[in-house]
Image (cartoon, helix red, strand yellow):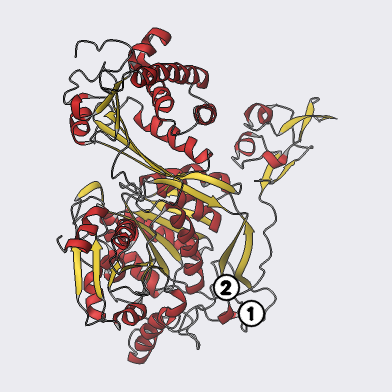
Amino acid sequence: MPRVITVDHSLCRGCNLCIELCPKSIFQDSAEIGPAGLRVKEVISPDNCTGCGLCELCCPGAISIDPLPDEVFTSICAEQKDRRVETNARGGWKEINSLLTPGRYFMTGNDAIVEAALAAGCRFFAGYPITPANEILEEMSRRMKGLGGKFIQAEDEIASVFMMLGASWAGLKAMTATAGPGFALMQEGLSLADMAEVPCVIVNVQRAGPSTGQATRPAAMDMREARYGSHGGVQRIVLYPDSVQETFDLTIESFNLAERFRVPVILLSDGYLSHLSEKVEIGERLRVYDRVYIPGEPAFGPTPDSSAPSMPRFGDGEDLQVTGSTHDRSGKRSTADPSVQENLVFYLDRKILSRREELVDCEEMLLDDAEVVVVAFGTAGRSAKWAVKEARKLGRAVGLLRPRTVYPFPTQRIMELSRSGAKFVVPEMSQGQMSFVISQCIANEVVPLPQPNGQIIDPRRILGYLTEGAW
Amino acid sequence: MQSEVIFSGKGGQGLGVMGRILALAAVLEGKEVASSASYGGEVTGGLSESEVVISDEKIDFPAVLNPDVLILLSQDSYNKYAPGVGREALVFCDPSFVDDRHDQENTRVLPVHAAEKAVQNFGRGQFANMVMLGAVVAVTNIVRPESIIQVISQELEEKNPELNEKAFKIGLDEGGQASCNRASDPADGTQNSHRPTDGG
């Protein structure tokens, strides 16, 4: 990706380090003789720059690499349009160039998370190694510096999550990645993120539990933990992709949602999807949302329309307090007033629930005349898709509903589908978590097909149930 | 058209690299590809596997269900897969690692002396995986050899692409001969290597 590379001729000592080190041969001798009596260097092909930063790191001070001037914000999210009156306000939707050269890539699920996060503008990562999320941490440690971001391997998951929250208040898009056991440790920090309205993205690459369980084996056992793991129990946004391409797309979506709603967004993956390699198409431009800051506006809710409040960063000059205790709109603690507490908690729920219809996102297949609706997400959704297509070939009236948003849960859509009297079948890589949620919202027959054995579900097993009724 | 390929053997035999290069070659040809690797806790010497699914259409389920091609480079892997795959699948194995090729009446087994060829040509067995991959590509035509060569030059840029390419071409010749022999012996697809099996 092209960058602005400048060589300050008054500082260049002609040492040749940049020419020696640059892997893309961007520098060469110029005609000019510098103060040290040697030829100063010039940039010949800035378009080839990969942004690795080696030249800047080793140069005794003459070279600086800067990203191209940030594209201006093109539009702003509808609910915040009226409030953007100040000229020095910032944030909203913008269209930017992809970080990677547009084209077709072949990458693993974990790599896709890293690439998408960096493309969406993530510039802070703190984490602690854990299988099967390790590659995210590893790749972030390689990539972050070249992009001018910060990477920290923290002493544990608790530190990681709080570092992420601090970085977010300092103005950076921040994330962390972990697996089930680490995610359990992060719950306290996530609860603070809920209360203090801190935008951040937490990736949970699920593995077979409880506890250490089978570290290298996939599972989807953390649906309930993602939503209900923290105390306080406010609404969360939880996404779960089923392919590497979708992992890429939903990672960008996670950042956009986190910034728009000022909430922690949880992106679920699993031990299989994280190491699966598939094709990813990367386009030329992408749409990202940056948190809105309007000088002088209170930094916390409840806002009148339940949209996210203005978010300054430290150093903007606002009178800012950030606390996990119940607070008023300025952030000042107010822990004795029952109405402040109630309004705040209802507001935190409403922030997500009032936009539930827009948030809920499902893949639907062959549902029009389905007598049996298979509901599955993530990797189990791939198994279900194969089984549903094969069952159709055998003349069975089955269809597939695959939620991409685990929360808010697609309750409305499931209720609509239940009106035909359809039976619901729910294959899961757990003892049965989603099947329980579905049975809570409809009166139809809901059949759980649980498989908590640390393996992906063999689609022939689902097909066996759909055709012969045996699990 | 969908091909499902399994590479199985011990850690350190380059199974992951073979899988990745085959997958990338298929991507280069515009196919849909899903690939995953798994290995035991100990990387060198433990069971190591790599799966590649190549299809003209979007792949619904990304893991292998009915393997068409199996490359089995250890006795354990052979024992695990060969007896169950039936005669539709084609099993490649290296006689240097798989002594006991039992149950051949139910399986189409094609021995390729990859490790031996690698030692003959390069003095060590390091490039055996590319010899084997060459033989697999020559026999099955899953991808075009040029695609593999292009991927080798890009992917193994820092790992001696010239020698890897040479090993791949040796494998292509081996595979070409092996499949000729197989075609000339329609009665039996099992004892069809151009050389006698090595006392297994």
Q: Amino acid at mark 1?
A: Arg
For label 1, the crowd category at 10 Å Cα-Cα, with few meaning under 14, some 14 to 19 and many 20 or more, is some
In screen coordinates, is A302 left or right of A62?
left
Residue farthest left in this picture: A470
> Residue at (24%, 24%) from the top-left corner?
B74
Q: Which mark is residue A292?
A: 2
Front residue of this view, candidates B112 and A347: B112
Could you classify mark 2 by the number of other residues whose Cα lies within 10 Å: few (under 14), some (14-19), or many (20 or more)? many
Disc 1: which chain? A
Which of the marked residues, 1 or 2, is nearer the chain's N terminus?
1
| Left or right of A185, for residue B157 | right
Q: Which residue is at 72% across, 41% downward?
A: A46
Q: Position of residue A228 (x, y in %)?
A: 27, 71
Residue A356 pos. (x, y %): 42, 79
Which residue lies under the disc numbered 1? A84
**Residues indicated by labels 1 and 2 sit on the same polypeptide chain:** yes
Q: Is residue B187 left or right of residue A360?
A: left
Closer to us: A310 or B82: B82
